[in-house]
């Protein structure tokens, strides 16, 4: 068992760092496709949890937000113990019960419609997916369109084509759907359900 003394530290300044991370997430949601970097200075989160994903967890997770972890994260005791200690969020094995999902390997994640999509009356009762990627500056080129975007925004990220297709299939269900937060290192980008994402050059 991991002892409390062995756990990696959380925020050095909980209030300031949580506020900075919350602002970064809100700015990212308001301006889809823009890269945000919360000044959380979180350098000791247990691998394979990235600093930005860890900062989001410390800011948004609590005892009322069940979280789902993909296999690499769930199989790492340092990660599960750190999340339990610092957030008190319960872990769930059921994707449909998760308020948040942390995904470290997007190539192996469940299909999107297995997560909670909310309802027409309560669209907020959906899963927010936090997807860890190797980069937010390299990879396939995508174009984003929707509220908060002037015309179209560009995004380069290693997102699987199947994931993009699954997300497009959910668009007609609006206001139901899924909000995505992409993270890489210290940086994050949001793609809310109101945003269309398509390969660059697609009609």
Image (cartoon, rainbow, N blue to C red):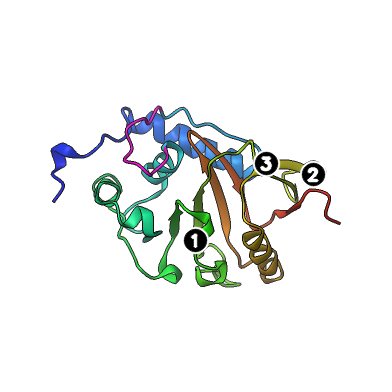
Q: Residue at x 55, y 48 (%)?
A: 181
Q: Residue at x 50, y 68 (%)?
A: 115
Residue 150, quarter of the rendered image: top right
Q: Which residue is mark 2?
A: 152
**In the image, which residues are magenta?**
41-50
Image quarter hosting the C terminus: bottom right
Residue 80: percent from left, percent from top: 28, 52
Residue 171: percent from left, percent from top: 70, 66
Mark 3 or mark 1: which comes first in sequence? 1
In the rendering, which numbered label is found on residue 108? 1
Residue 174, quarter of the rendered image: bottom right
Q: Is residue 104 above or below residue 114?
A: above
Answer few, some or many: residues within 10 Å of disc 1's Cα (few below 14, many 20 plus, some between 14 and 19): few
Dot in front, 3 or 1: 1
Residue 65: percent from left, percent from top: 38, 58
Residue 46, quarter of the rendered image: top left
Q: Which residue is mark 3?
A: 156
Q: Residue at x 50, y 69 (%)?
A: 116
Query: In screen coordinates, is 159 left or right of 89?
Result: right
């Amino acid at each position: 068992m991991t002892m409390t003394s062995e756990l990696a530290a959380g925020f050095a300044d909980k209030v300031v760092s949580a506020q900075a991370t919350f602002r970064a997430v809100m700015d990212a949601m308001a301006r889809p496709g823009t890269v945000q970097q919360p000044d959380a200075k979180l350098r000791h989160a247990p691998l394979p949890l990235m600093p930005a994903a860890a900062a989001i967890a410390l800011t948004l997770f609590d005892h009322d937000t069940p979280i789902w972890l993909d296999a690499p994260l769930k199989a790492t005791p340092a990660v599960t113990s750190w999340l339990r200690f610092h957030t008190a969020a319960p872990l769930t094995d059921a994707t449909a019960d998760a308020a948040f999902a942390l995904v470290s390997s997007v190539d192996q994640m469940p299909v999107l419609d297995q997560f909670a999509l909310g309802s027409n009356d309560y669209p907020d009762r959906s899963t927010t997916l936090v997807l860890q990627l190797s980069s937010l500056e390299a990879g396939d080129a995508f174009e984003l369109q929707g509220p908060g975007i002037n015309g179209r925004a560009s995004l380069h990220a290693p997102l699987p084509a199947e994931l993009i297709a699954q997300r497009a299939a959910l668009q007609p269900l609006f206001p139901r759907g899924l909000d995505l937060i992409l993270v890489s290192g210290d940086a994050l980008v949001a793609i809310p359900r109101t945003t269309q994402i398509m390969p660059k050059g697609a009609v």
